[in-house]
Amino acid sequence: MARQDIDAPGPKKRVLFICTHNAARSQMAEALLKNKYGSRYEVGSAGSRPGKLDPLAVKVLQEIGIDISQNKPKSVDDFVRPGTEYDYVVTVCDAAAQECPFLPAVHQVHKPFNDPSRFYGTEEEQLNNMRSLRDQISDWIDDFFR
């Protein structure tokens, strides 16, 4: 999906990624967008029910030189402020799309990705699944925000 308004000059566009626990998918999306296109976007992430940062998400981002080890999961409520509007609010899981409060945004985007809490198997199998998830999110960010 090509976005013509993304390359417009001016202030940074505001993007908020949301998933249920703000533990993996939204954290990775935030970090990847900041890393790739941070000069054009002010990026945050939050959860409808914040949990604990997923250590496998930390590990697979470290593999590509991005450190989120000090990130803390945040609540969507922390981003609901009078007069605050986002250019993009992106839900990255099905549950968040159903549970989240309305956040004013020019574009509401729903792009669900696989739930890492459902990755089973050995640690290496789980890491491979998380790498695949990281790469899917990264590719989508390139396609949507480039």
Image (cartoon, rainbow, N blue to C red):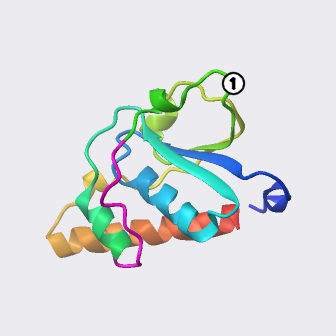
Q: Identify the image quadrant of the N terminus.
A: bottom right
Q: Quadrant of residue 88?
A: top right
Compared across the picture, whether 51 is left or right of 92 comes to: left
Compared across the picture, whether 17 is left or right of 58 comes to: right
Which residue appears at 69% of the width and 24% of the height? 83
The residue under label 1 is which amino acid type?
A: Gly
Front one among 45 and 120: 45
- The kind of secondary structure element at disc 1 is loop
| Image coords of residue 49 (percent x, y) | 35, 32
Residue of label 1: 83
Q: Tell whether position 72 is magenta.
A: yes
Dot 1 alpha-carbon crowd within 10 angstroms: few under 14, some 14 to 19, many 20 or more: few
Q: Tell whether position 32 is magenta.
A: no
Magenta portion: prevailing SS class: loop
| Image coords of residue 61 (percent x, y) | 38, 70
Q: Quadrant of residue 58?
A: bottom left
Compared across the picture, whether 29 is left or right of 71 comes to: right
Of all residues, the one furthest to the bottom in this rendering is: 64
| Image coords of residue 139 (percent x, y) | 57, 70
Q: Quadrant of residue 81?
A: top right
Residue 78 vertical position relative to residue 64 in the rendered view, above or below? above
Residue numbers of the magenta segment: 63-73
